[in-house]
Amino acid sequence: MGEAVSIARNPTRAVGIGSIAIGGGRPIAVQSMCATKTTDVEATLAQIESLAAAGAGVVRVAVDTPKDVEALAAIRPRTRANLSVDLQENYRLAERVAPWVDKIRYNPGHLHHHEPDRPWQDKVRWLADAAGQQDCAIRIGVNGGSVDPALQARFAHGDSVGPMLASVLEHCAVLDAIGFDRYCVSLKDSDPVRVLEANRRFAAQRPDVPLHLGVTEAGMPPEGIARTRAALGPLLREGIGDTLRVSLTVPFARKCEEVEAGRRLLDDVARGVPVGEAETESLGSGLRIVSCPSCSRVENEAFVELAEEIRRMTRDMAACPLTIAVMGCRVNGPGETDDADLGVWCGPTQVHLSRRGEHLGAFGYAEILGILRKELDRLVGE
Ligand code: SF4
């Protein structure tokens, strides 16, 4: 298991996750996530072991189907790594998943998709019960791109991190009310400025709750690392954050780079390097490519290559203040690209394209670059 780095921090409570704890003055743990198909037991096990060997204190795995749960049950006895599971749309799998993992992450924005008539508070209580019975921690993981629509509407003309913050606070209140305190929280967004503000505001209101830090869809290195350091550097220096992940769009075999970047960030903060200042300056206001870090749900492995090709193709447009979002699956693709000028999300044989939230169509992998370029030129012309 990775040796963690000590940095002076806020007095959050300790939350146990398998053999480690986060918060309560414990060293900050670096996390990462498998990008292999969860049902491919050997490949997923190999990735878990390599991430743990690189220094990941917790390794996350995606679970979408009962077959994924079966795979997890086969993986658990073969690794000592602390495992976390990402439930995304499938909160109802929690009961079957909990015996095999140390932490369950759910996204408040996804709880309304299934059983829409059941109050979300009931679902949260049920999740806490499933986790509690199996000695699991919970992460309430809110993402700027998938906040509950009812909350988005409430803050339509308000501040940009208000919906995320309100969502997380109301979920904390439900867990607090039933006495479940083995939870941490994350407030992620693809914009480092929003991550910074959301986490600062949460820490001010709930200094007791451990925080998992990260910039979601940070993109490819080196930009993805710079975006993460721009947000997390100042937070860590202020004593905010108990665990973190650097999400990077890299081929499956290079996933350890996430852990290496996380450890480097912690080392730099511990040495007093002003992490975040130079990075914020280097990001500027030109073309921004945000892309997901990929996971078990990637539908075509050409996704990472496509993201790299888009970066190459747009090098001459670096000064254009536009955002292109590139996502690896059709589950999260549509919602997570809504705020981008152009959104691209990958299906098994086709790539979907949207322009400022409007779906323009699905195109073959061979033709998408040309079509994307035309749309970009059109936007620049306007
Ligand atoms: S967008 Fe899809 S493939 Fe990418 S990390 Fe999110 S769930 Fe996984």
Image (cartoon, grey):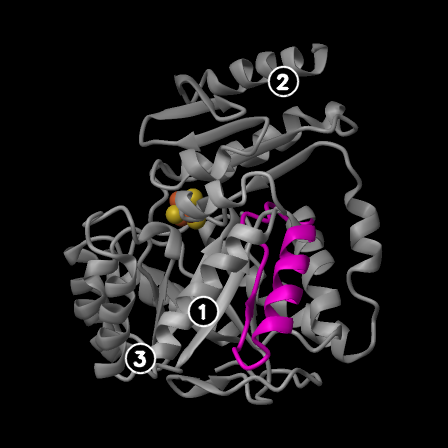
Vertical placement of residue 9 versus 379, above or below: below
Q: Secondary structure at mark 3?
A: loop
- From the image, tell me which residue sits under label 1: 50
- At x 17%, y 68%, the residue is 96
Q: Secondary structure at mark 2?
A: helix
Vertical placement of residue 80 versus 224, above or below: below
Q: Is mark 1 within 8 Å of ligand 1?
A: no
Stretch in magenta: 193-222
Q: Quadrant of residue 349?
A: top left
Q: Position of residue 353 (x, y in %)?
A: 46, 23
Q: Earlier in the sequence, mark 3 or mark 2?
A: 3
Instruction: Describe residue 8's horizontal placement relative to residue 258 as left or right.
Output: right
Instruction: Describe residue 349's horizontal placement relative to residue 314 as left or right.
Output: left
- Using the rendered image of the protein, determine whether residue 318 is visible from the camera's viewpoint: yes
CA distance separating discs 1 and 3: 38 Å
Q: Position of residue 114 (x, y in %)?
A: 22, 48
Q: Earlier in the sequence, mark 1 or mark 2?
A: 1
- From the image, tell me which residue sits under label 2: 376
Hey, what amino acid is under mark 2? Leu
Vertical placement of residue 6 versus 113, above or below: below
Q: Earlier in the sequence, mark 1 or mark 3?
A: 1
